[in-house]
Image: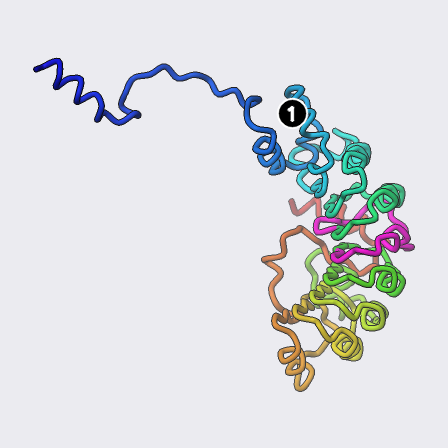
Amino acid sequence: MAASFSSTLSTFVPPLMMKYEDEPRNWTDLPSELTSSILLRLGAIEILENAQKVCTSWRRICKHPSMWQKIDMRDLGNRGQHNLIFDVLCRQAVDLSQGGLLEIYIENFATDSLLNYIADRSSNLRSLGNGFRMHYTSISNKGNAIEKLPLLETLEVSHPTLKLNLKAIGHACPQLKTLKLNSSGSDFLGLDELNYGTFGIDCDDEYALAIAESMPELRHLQLLGDRLTASGLNAILDGCPHLEHLDLRKCFNINMVGDLEKQCLERVKEFRRPNDSTADYPFDVIFVNYDLYQHIEVFCDLSAYFD
């Protein structure tokens, strides 16, 4: 009877309460589909420098073109600019995509040579940028590489000193729906509006008119720190009839009063005004007046005394 009761009780003991000897999990035994899903959560640098070196099966998965439809090289961690050759790693990742690259996000190691390498091997590219910051890189003002991407839908560039040919880019990329251009000339080292009185920031509707003329399919437009005026803004509203999101933070040449602000609020679903906070902006960007670029080293040297 006792033996029978004991046997019956054991069938009701929850598995977690039963004693058993744990066996270490062998991650290499996971199905390849599950392994690739896990590895895709890593950045490109982690895959190239670490994951693909774990074992033969992981290396095989890491080399499959499906792993490289999206390349994210924004998170450099604690790696300094000289710890790894990011240009070489980026080219390796592009090669592994075998022409299937759809999205690429890179940091401030971009050069004309690298951008042309990407464009020449990635004709299906849909998105370029997001963390694509051209602060102190060897990028020219031509933008020829971007013009090689006819299917491009999203472009984001931060460029305190770079002057893009937006009209040519717009005509070459007729499907462009999201454009984010940051820091073309309002705030320098946090001075904001003070630059206008101190240094005299000129008005400039060149970008605005180029966008209005060549990018009629835009849905999202962000112009942080641009020099455009009310005339340029009106041109954008007329030339981009599908615009849904408009971000004009740090664009201090625009006086948002009267009918202009009303028109923006009526035309777009989400409107960010020049004086709205940039606290939610995901990248650490300094807004620079590129006419004052020659003063950057002086300001940087002085800022060291306030650390």
- x and y percentages locating residue 32 in the rendered image: 60, 29
- Residue shown at 57% from the left, 22% from the top: 28
Residue 222 to residue 213: above or below: above
Residue 200 in sight in this render:
no
Residue 303 to residue 209: above or below: above
Span colored in magenta? 129-155
The reply, left or right, for residue 4 in relation to residue 233 is left
Residue 283 to residue 97: above or below: below
Residue 142 in sight in this render:
yes
Q: Confirm whether the magenta stretch covers residue 151.
A: yes
Q: Foreground: 35 or 185?
A: 35
Name the image quarter holding the C terminus: top right
Residue 270 to residue 86: above or below: below
Q: Quadrant of residue 262?
A: bottom right
Secondary structure at badge 1 equals: helix
- Residue shown at 87% from the left, 65% from the top: 167
Q: What type is the residue that disc 1 sits on? A: Trp
Applied colour scheme: rainbow
Q: Foreground: 144 or 138?
A: 144
Name the image quarter holding the N terminus: top left
Q: Confirm whether the magenta stretch covers residue 84.
A: no
Q: Quadrant of residue 100?
A: top right
Q: Return the residue at label 1.
A: 58
Q: Residues within 10 Å of mark 1 (few under 14, many from 20)?
A: some
Q: Foreground: 46 or 207?
A: 46
